[in-house]
Image (cartoon, rainbow, N blue to C red):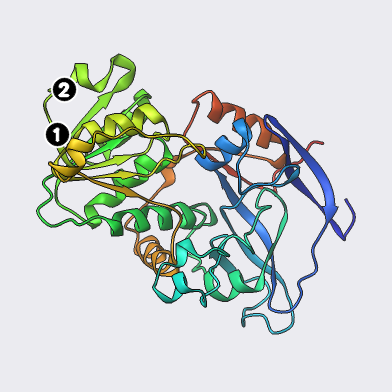
């Protein structure tokens, strides 16, 4: 690697990551170049590695959860100092379309136009719209590893803000991966309702209990319906498995007048059969949740800085750039929750 190149992990095709030597970007007008301190690989990266993802082109740069320091500033970039610690998210809405004017920034047709990919590298270029809207200074008291949780936390905030919490007495979190466990940590900021969890890994079940869930079911011991009262329903069900049978179970477990939030995404054109009787006569509300708006990012950052969410237990280890492939393979096998990527670790290519 020369002074003008960097090492970065690229997703070549499903199941294959390569570390490549690529040019270090030069920031243009309004852009900021970051030196990456930590990136996180989680569920979205796992899915892209396993089967591809519509928002992650292949072959190409990989990784979108990051924290780092300012390495270079383009002309007219936001006023930051070289070396200043920062945190951010990977997208920004246009702010001018009809959806943005109605406050639905997350549904902006251009929200992914300037998306940031390449956090699994030594340097990362932040486009002007993202630098202007969604890049923030980071206090020294907040580690880069925890700061990289801003993006998943913003997704959680967006989901929790969609729910009408009035009168809610019980919440079921179905699926205890990284996002389900983040829900477990963040739910008390929104509701005092009883929190119940269901997941497939003993260590995740233990963590959910540790974070105050009143009941947690280990689905490796059998289906939820066999471990609990089959007639029990919940006022709110948060579906975090991203599987069709998980969507169905979440809907079936929602109480009359309740709300089921389908957080885990399914492939395009997947048909979800919902009993029309329950939707019409029992007024079960079905909610989708996608991405986040700037207000969600701001609130997530506020909670992160306040220490409301620790998140360290969600990180199962740290890998070098040369170990990104192995880290993703571990996630595919169900080993660990998410892994931090430290580009400063010794690189073997």
Q: Position of residue 162 (x, y in %)?
A: 29, 57
For label 1, the crowd category at 10 Å Cα-Cα, with few meaning under 14, some 14 to 19 and many 20 or more, is some
What residue is at 66 percent from the left and 54 percent from the top? Answer: 117
Q: Is residue 104 above or below residue 337?
A: below
Tell me where residue 266 appears, x and y as whole percent. Answer: 46, 37
**Which label is found at residue 228?**
2
Judged left or right of residue 321, residue 235 is left
Image height of 227 relative to 256, above or below: above
Front label number (1 vs 2): 1
Q: Is mark 2 on a helix, strand or loop?
A: loop
Q: In which quarter of the image is the C terminus?
A: top right
**Any part of residue 42 in sight:** no
* Closer to the camera in the image, 108 or 163: 108
Query: What residue is rendered at 48% in x and 56% in y?
Result: 151
- Quadrant of the image occupied by residue 201: top left
Q: Of helix, strand and loop, which one carries label 1? A: loop
**Disc 1, disc 2: CB below 8 Å?**
no
Q: Mark 1 points at which residue?
A: 233
- Gap between marks 1 and 2 measured at Cα: 11 Å
Position of 286 relative to 76 (above/below): above
What residue do we see at 63% from left, 37% from top? 52
Left or right: 316, with 39 as reference point? left
Pointer 2 local density, CA inside 10 Å: few below 14, some 14–19, many at least 20:
few
């Amino acid at each position: 690697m020369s002074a003008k190149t960097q090492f970065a992990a690229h997703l070549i095709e499903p199941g294959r990551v390569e570390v490549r030597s690529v040019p270090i970007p030069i920031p243009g007008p309004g852009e900021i170049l970051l030196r990456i301190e930590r990136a996180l690989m989680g569920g979205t990266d796992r899915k892209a590695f396993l089967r591809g993802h519509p928002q992650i082109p292949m072959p190409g740069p990989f990784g979108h959860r990051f924290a780092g320091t300012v390495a270079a500033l383009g002309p007219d970039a936001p006023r930051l100092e070289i070396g200043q610690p920062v945190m951010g998210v990977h997208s920004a809405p246009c702010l001018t379309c009809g959806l943005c004017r109605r406050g639905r920034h997350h549904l902006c047709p251009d929200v992914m136009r300037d998306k940031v990919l390449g956090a699994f590298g030594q340097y990362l270029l932040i486009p002007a719209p993202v630098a202007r809207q969604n890049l923030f200074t980071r206090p020294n008291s907040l580690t880069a590893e925890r700061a990289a949780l801003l993006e998943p936390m913003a997704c959680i905030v967006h989901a929790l803000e969609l729910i009408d919490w009035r009168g809610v007495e019980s919440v079921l979190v179905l699926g205890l991966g990284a996002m389900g466990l983040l829900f477990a940590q963040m739910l008390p900021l929104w509701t005092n309702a009883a929190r119940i969890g269901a997941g497939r890994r003993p260590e995740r079940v233990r963590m959910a209990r540790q974070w105050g869930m009143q009941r947690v079911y280990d689905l490796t011991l059998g289906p939820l319906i066999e471990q609990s009262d089959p007639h029990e329903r919940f006022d709110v069900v948060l579906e975090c498995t991203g599987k069709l049978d998980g969507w169905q179970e979440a809907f079936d477990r929602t109480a009359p007048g309740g709300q089921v939030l389908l957080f885990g995404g399914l492939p395009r054109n997947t048909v979800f059969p919902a009993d029309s009787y329950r939707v019409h006569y029992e007024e079960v509300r079905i909610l989708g949740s996608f991405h986040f708006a700037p207000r969600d990012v701001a609130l997530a950052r506020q909670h992160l800085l306040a220490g409301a969410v620790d998140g360290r237990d969600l990180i199962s280890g740290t890998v070098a750039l040369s170990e990104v492939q192995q880290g993703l393979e571990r996630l595919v096998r169900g080993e660990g929750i998410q892994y931090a990527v430290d580009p400063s670790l010794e690189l073997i290519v």
